[in-house]
Amino acid sequence: MALKISKVDGDVCESEESHIRTYFVEEWGYDEAFVTDGLSFIQSKIDDYSIKELAQTLAKFKKENRDCNYKPMSQEIIKLLTDIMKVDGEIDEREEMSIELVSKIFLEANKVRPKKLVKDSWSLVTSGVATIIKKGIIPSNK
C-alpha cells in the first residue's frame, strides 16, 4: 500500500522508495536486500491492485488476526502513508485523498455493528447447544 500511495501522483520517486525501504529495515528489522527485492517485485505488479482493495484486505486481516492490535496498527499505517506523502516535499491532493480513503476504510472496518454482533453471538449459542445435544451431554427427546 505504501508504494501504491507513493505512485498516486505519477511515479514512485527515490525519496519515497528510500523512506519505505528504511521504514521496513529499521522499524520491522527486515534485511535491506530482502526489502529492495520485495519493493522491485511489488512495483512490477502495482497496477494490478487498487488502494481500496488493498486497504480492505489489510483491514480484514487486522480484524481477524489476534496478533494485531487494530487501532494502533491502523494509526501506524496511516502515519507511514502520511510520511511517504510528505517525504518528497510535495503534497499532492490525490495522495491526501487516497490516505483519507484508507483511513475511512480502516474506521469502517473497526465499527461495532450491534445487529451483526447479536446475530454472530446467537449463532455461537445455537451451534454450541447443537454440539452439546449431538454429543449426548444433554439427552435428546428422541
Image (cartoon, grey):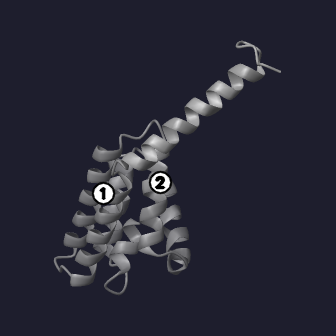
Residue 53 percent coordinates (x, y): 48, 69
Q: CA distance from mark 1 to mark 2?
A: 12 Å
Q: Residue at the location (46% across, 66% down)? A: 54
Residue 104 percent coordinates (x, y): 30, 65
- Dot label at residue 60: 2
Q: Residue 19 sits in which quadrant?
A: bottom left
Q: Sequence order check: which comes first, mark 1 or mark 2?
A: 2
Observer-nearest of 37 and 71: 71
Residue 118 percent coordinates (x, y): 44, 41
Residue 60 vs residue 13: left or right?
Answer: right
Residue 106 vs residue 117: left or right?
Answer: left
Q: Residue 136 sits in which quadrant?
A: top right
What type is the residue that disc 1 sits on?
Leu
Residue labelled with disc 1: 107
Q: Residue at the location (51% across, 42% down)? A: 120
**Residue closest to the far front:** 141
Observer-nearest of 44 and 124: 124
